[in-house]
């Protein structure tokens, strides 16, 4: 056993074996197989490991050559596509044939259990039904808006102090804390207070982020199961993080169950948060509640923080666009240039109807999500043999992934200016926001499994952005800084995003 683990850790052995298999595989696939056609094999799964730090740019480069291609993997076939026609087929037309399957579930289930992100079939349908009902309730809408407003005020105050003291701040770190606090409050009715520096909250958040990254690494490491078995390397690290996460989450669940059981007067018990409503029905199943919590945190926290960070980064790189966004916000909120206002007064004006008068902000958000989609690559498993609309075959058990990150950079989809940050591409001649086909703009997925939180996400992004951009001007502390991303389940900003903030005229100390 020890010998095989040593060999698996030896890059020369692993690379050599792959090269031999790769050449053999290429030879086989060049032979006609009962008239079937397969996508060209562009590289091997090991190339993903070697290019891990710039994984999505690497996949984009391959996508510039082929709209769909295979990566050689001895375990199962891997097909990657940026072709909207294939994407529509996988996500909608033949939805039944493509799902998470055993492979994706086995990679993600230590972290996400049997939550909505890992299951298929009836299990998925049931959870989707309950979650859709939750998302459509007025209670959730109102409670989440209040929570995001309250936490945005906290963030506004931190930025005010930074503006007064000319302090450089890491806005990415603040967004991660803001969204963790907000999602925890909406999901579980608990003040985590990451923004205020609560130690336990910060510890949980770090463990969650690390577990998220380590889980993603499994997709490119064919030896992860062996490492898990021997509890070595990254798998040992993942196990430590999962323990921190589980200890914390089970404590939250226990507390919630006790609170609900102790409350004598049912009518006084507040059940605004999502966990309270699930506890009513599933209080005997803490594992199920744990999975719901973690899937909800994964769904809601990172995508909002990430989208805000990339938006601020792009607006720092394009100060003229930042001014245009701010002008629209101030007009929509009816803030006069001579008016003196603080963050609390400001947020009172950010009503739903005011947010609807901000199509340019909406466009700027879509533009940064197009270029930096929270989920850069989304793999599905083919449940049966199939032929994609481009005429190429996939076999039962093959993984077929569409790639929102690479798709956002394809000239054949967005035109020659695909790489430019240009909110105008989302507006019609009259300046009204124009929806794109979900099979071209795939950041929220599409078809029956489309993101359930899309409307929720835009509303919260617009609340945060309208307050921050209406009250402050942002600049990169180092204007030459070029941000890169960290590879994980979500496409995070790599490292700190250091910015300087100054007040807009008329905006005063709260
Ligand atoms: C910019 C923000 C967001 C983006 C880009 C985004 C993107 C996505 C994507 C790509 C999926 C499909 C994932 C998969 O294949 O497993 C998804 C699913 C989902 N999203 Fe979002 N999301 C965002 C925000 C949110 C928020 C804030 C929530 C809720 C709080 C949410 C709730 C969900 C849920 C419940 C699903 C699972 C749908 C299903 O499998 O039926 N999302 N989202």
Image (cartoon, rainbow, N blue to C red):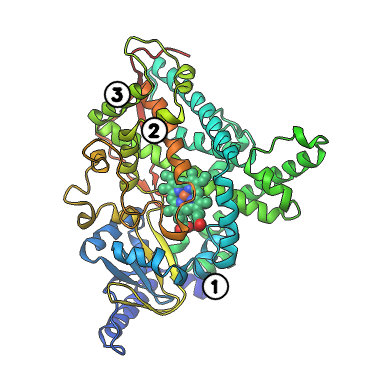
Q: Which mark is residue 356?
A: 2
* Of 415 and 81, the residue lying toward us: 415
Going from N to C along the chain, the mark reached first, 2 or 1, is 1
Q: Nearer the viewer, mark 2 or mark 1?
A: 2
Say whether marks 3 and 2 touch (CB < 8 Å): no
Residue 84 is left or right of residue 182, and the answer is left
Judge from the rendering whether residue 419 lies leftward or rightward of residue 293; answer left or right. left
Q: Image quadrant for the N terminus?
A: bottom right
How far is mark 3 from mark 1, CA to CA?
65 Å
Badge 2 density bin: few <14, some 14–19, many ≥20, Cα 10 Å: some
Distance between the alpha carbons at the discs numbered 2 and 1: 62 Å
Q: Is there a contact, CB below 8 Å, between mark 3 and mark 1?
A: no
Q: Is residue 213 visible?
A: no
Q: Earlier in the sequence, mark 3 or mark 2?
A: 3
Which residue is found at the position 33% from the left and 22% from the top? Answer: 331
Q: Give residue 168's position: percent from left, percent from top.
A: 38, 25
316 over 298 or under it: above or below:
above
Report the residue marked by disc 1.
2
Which of the 4 image quarters holds residue 184? Answer: top right
Residue displayed at 23% across by 55% down = 413
- Is residue 472 positioned above or below 109 on the image? above
Mark 3 = which residue?
327
Identify which residue is drawn at 39% across, 72% down.
14
- Foreground tag (3 vs 1): 3
* SS at mark 2 in the image: loop
Between 143 and 220, the one nearer to me in the picture: 143
The residues tagged by marks 3 and 2 sit, at their Cα atoms, a distance apart of: 15 Å
């Amino acid at each position: 056993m020890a010998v095989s683990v040593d060999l698996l850790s030896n890059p020369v052995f692993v690379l050599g074996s792959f090269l031999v298999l790769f050449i053999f595989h290429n030879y086989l696939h060049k032979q006609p197989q009962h008239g079937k056609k397969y996508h060209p094999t562009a590289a091997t799964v090991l190339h993903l490991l070697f290019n891990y730090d710039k994984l999505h740019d690497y996949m984009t480069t391959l996508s510039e050559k082929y709209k769909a291609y295979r990566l050689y993997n001895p375990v199962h076939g891997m097909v990657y596509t940026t072709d909207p026609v294939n994407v529509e087929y996988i996500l909608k037309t033949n939805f039944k044939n493509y799902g998470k399957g055993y492979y994706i579930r086995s990679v993600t289930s230590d972290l996400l259990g049997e939550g909505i992100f890992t299951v298929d079939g009836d299990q998925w349908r049931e959870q989707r039904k309950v979650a859709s009902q939750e998302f459509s309730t007025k209670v959730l809408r109102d409670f989440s808006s209040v929570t995001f407003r309250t936490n945005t005020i906290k963030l506004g105050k931190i930025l005010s102090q930074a503006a007064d003291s000319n302090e450089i701040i890491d806005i990415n770190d603040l967004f991660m804390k803001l969204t963790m606090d907000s999602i925890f409050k909406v999901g579980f009715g608990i003040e985590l207070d990451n923004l205020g520096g609560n130690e336990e909250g910060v510890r949980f958040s770090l463990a969650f982020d690390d577990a998220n990254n380590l889980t993603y690494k499994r997709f490119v490491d064919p030896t992860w199961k062996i490492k898990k078995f021997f509890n070595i390397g990254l798998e040992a690290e993942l196990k430590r993080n999962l323990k921190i996460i589980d200890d914390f989450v089970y404590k939250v669940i226990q507390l919630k169950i006790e609170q609900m059981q102790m409350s004598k007067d049912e009518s006084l018990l507040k059940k605004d948060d999502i966990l309270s409503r699930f506890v009513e029905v599933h209080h005997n199943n803490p594992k199920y509640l744990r999975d719901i919590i973690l899937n909800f945190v994964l769904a809601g926290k990172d995508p909002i923080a990430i989208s805000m960070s990339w938006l601020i980064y792009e607006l720092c790189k394009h100060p003229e666009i930042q001014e245009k966004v701010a002008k629209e916000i101030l007009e929509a909120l009816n803030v006069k240039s001579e008016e003196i206002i603080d963050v609390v007064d400001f947020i009172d004006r950010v009503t739903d109807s005011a947010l609807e008068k901000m199509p340019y902000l909406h466009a700027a958000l879509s533009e940064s999500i197009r270029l930096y989609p929270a989920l850069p690559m989304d793999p599905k498993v083919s449940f049966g043999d199939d032929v994609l609309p481009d005429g190429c075959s996939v076999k039962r058990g093959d993984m077929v992934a569409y790639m929102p990150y690479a798709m956002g950079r394809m000239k054949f989809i967005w035109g020659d200016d695909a790489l430019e940050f240009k909110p105008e591409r989302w507006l019609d001649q009259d300046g009204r926001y124009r929806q794109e086909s979900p099979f071209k703009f795939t950041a929220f997925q599409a078809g029956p499994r489309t993101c359930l939180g899309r409307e929720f996400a835009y509303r919260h992004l617009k609340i945060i952005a309208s307050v921050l951009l209406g009250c402050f001007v942002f600049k990169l502390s180092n204007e030459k800084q070029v941000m890169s991303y960290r590879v994980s389940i979500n496409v995070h900003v790599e490292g700190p995003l250091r910015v300087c903030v100054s007040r807009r005229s008329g905006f005063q100390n709260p």
